[in-house]
Amino acid sequence: MDNPIFFNTFASERKITFSMNIEQLEKVEITKKILDKIKIKQCNICLDEYEIADKISYLPCFHYFHYN
């Protein structure tokens, strides 16, 4: 964590994420094809497993979560 390059990169990424409005994030409905491609099969916020027809959104860092 003492590496200034790492810290500066993390800080700038954090600033970009916080400046985004959650409503601007892309929203998708999970299909079998999408579910097969997602590596982590649970919501990063509520920790429920994703199911087909769930509505999800994702951050620029590709952390997925239920948006409803």
Image: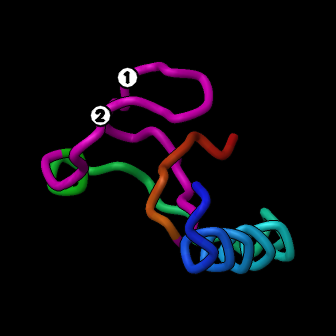
Q: Is residue 38 magenta?
A: yes
Q: Is residue 60 left or right of residue 25?
A: left
Which quarter of the picture shows residue 6?
bottom right
Taking the magenta stretch, the answer to whether it contains residue 31 is no
Q: Residue at x 61, y 60 (%)?
A: 2
Q: Position of residue 65 (x, y in %)?
A: 55, 43
Q: Earlier in the sequence, mark 1 or mark 2?
A: 2
> Amino acid type of disc 1?
Glu
Q: Secondary structure at mark 2?
A: loop
The colour scheme applied to this rendered structure is rainbow
Left of 15 or right of it: where is 59? left
Residue 68, position in %: x, y?
69, 40
Name the residue that disc number 2 marks: 41
Relative vertical location of residue 66 with respect to residue 15 in this rendering, above or below: above
Residue bearing mark 1: 49
**Callout 1 environment at 10 Å: few (<14), some (14 to 19), or many (20+)?**
few
Disc 1 + disc 2, Cβ < 8 Å: yes
Q: Which residues are magenta?
A: 36-60
List x then y, in percent, for residue 64: 48, 49
Q: Main secondary structure of the magenta part?
A: loop
